[in-house]
Image (cartoon, grey):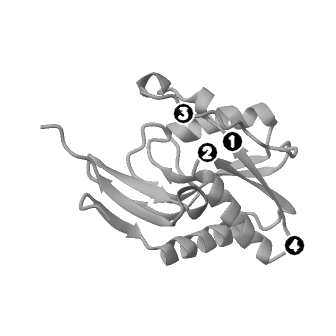
Amino acid sequence: MPADERPLLTKAQMADGVKALARRIREANPDAESIALVGIFTRGVPLAKRIAAEMEKDGGLKVFVGTIDITQYRDDLNTFQMVPKLEGSDISFDIDGLTVVLCDEVVYTGRSVRAALDELLNFGRPKRVQLAALVDRCGRELPVQPDFSALKVTLAPGERVAVRFEEVDGHDSCTVQTQASNR
């Protein structure tokens, strides 16, 4: 691990966090016969799939899993040196009247969630939309709060949370990276 990176969650703590998220989502939706978990590209997708796998272990609940690409809804595309690759959204089930849980690895400013809501509502009118994050980083710019999070942190300016999933990055880790200051 580079000197400018420190651990925030171990692999085991990440797994425990996913289990806790699954349990809390089930507890918050006791009467639901089905629920949809929709992962925000990129790392919200493996998070949604892992939560769904945990929820399905208990049985009795139909869990749909979808993915959402917010690239076209971002309000900061003009600041990117390279435009992110369009992945396309994949929600192959009817969300009308369904409880949908948006999943993202980190909720920070709230802007990604705002973009995800814009895209999600193109697919229908859910009964309710909830938000699950592995890490809730303080510092909102929009009035968006996760309903479920495994960890809540406050970081200094110049620090960022970096979550890596085996499915995307080849290994699981959750660290704080300190960006080099421009002197």
Query: Label 4 sits on what residue type?
Result: Gly
Front-most of 57 and 86? 86
Q: Pinpoint residue 122: horizontal percent, then vertical percent.
A: 76, 31
Along the polypeptide, which appears first: circle 3 or circle 4?
A: 4
Mark 1 and mark 3 residues within 8 Å of each other at the beta carbon: no
* Residue depicted at x 58% and y 55%: 168
Mark 1 secondary-structure assignment: strand
Determine the CA span between mark 1 and mark 4.
Answer: 26 Å
Q: Which residue is mark 4?
A: 60
Front-most of 43 and 34? 43
Along the polypeptide, which appears first: circle 1 or circle 2?
A: 2
Determine the CA span between mark 1 and mark 2.
Answer: 6 Å
The numbered dot on residue 41 is 2
Along the polypeptide, which appears first: circle 1 or circle 4?
A: 4
Along the polypeptide, which appears first: circle 1 or circle 3?
A: 1
Query: Label 3 sits on what residue type?
Result: Pro
Label 2 Cα crowd, 10 Å radius (few <14 / some 14-19 / many 20+): many
Determine the CA span between mark 2 and mark 4.
Answer: 28 Å
Q: Is residue 133 above or below residue 22?
A: above
Front-most of 56 and 86? 86
Quadrant where the N terminus is found in the figure: bottom left
Closer to the observer: label 3 or label 4? 3
* Residue depicted at x 80% and y 38%: 125
Label 3 Cα crowd, 10 Å radius (few <14 / some 14-19 / many 20+): few
Mark 2 secondary-structure assignment: loop
Q: Pinpoint residue 72: horizontal percent, then vertical percent.
A: 61, 27
Mark 3 secondary-structure assignment: loop
Q: Is residue 153 above or below residue 93?
A: below
**Position of 5 compared to 67: left or right?**
left
Q: Pinpoint residue 77: horizontal percent, then vertical percent.
A: 49, 26
Q: Which residue is mark 1?
A: 68
